Amino acid sequence: MEMLSRNFTNAKIKLYTCNTQKGKWPELPADVDLFHIDGDHTTAGSFFDMAMAFTRMKRGAYLLVDDYDFLPDVRIGVDSFISAFSSLISDYKYFPTFRGDVLITRA
């Protein structure tokens, strides 16, 4: 939270955490700018988390997924998601961080 506040001084930042594998998402505003997925590390679980987040994202919002390089199941889930949702994605980028991050932009 401190890093976000320091780097995005004009942003209203509110963090939500949840265990999506228990089937419950928190109530979220309609104008979410960024989702960070670090959840279930199975292929199906990572795909599900990304799909659920995408349904709650406004145009131009970002979806950040970590562990792309670290966990093969996450890589498969991300690649499958990008393929399945390609018509709703305006851009995606890979970042070679400690465990690998992928940033996806909603069209």
Image (cartoon, helix red, strand yellow):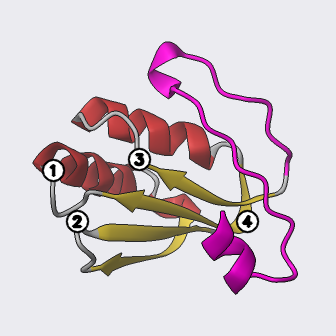
Give me the C-alpha separation between circle 2 and circle 4.
27 Å
Marker disc for residue 38: 3
**Residue 11, x across and y down, in percent:** 84, 74
Mark 1–mark 2 contact, CB under 8 Å? yes
Q: Residue furthest front?
A: 2
Name the residue beneath numbered marker 2: 99
Q: Secondary structure at mark 2?
A: loop
Give me the C-alpha separation between circle 3 and circle 2.
11 Å
Name the residue beneath numbered marker 1: 71
Q: Which residues are magenta?
A: 1-30
**Amino acid type, residue under disc 4 in the picture:** Arg
Give the answer, above or below, for where 5 lies relative to 69: below
Label 3 or label 1, whichever comes before in sequence order: 3
- Tell whether 10 sits left or right of 84: right
Give me the C-alpha separation between circle 1 and circle 4.
29 Å
Name the residue beneath numbered marker 4: 59
Which secondary structure dominates the residues rendered in magenta?
loop
Give me the C-alpha separation between circle 1 and circle 2.
8 Å
Q: Secondary structure at mark 3?
A: loop
Label 2 or label 4, whichever comes before in sequence order: 4
**Amino acid type, residue under disc 1 in the picture:** Leu
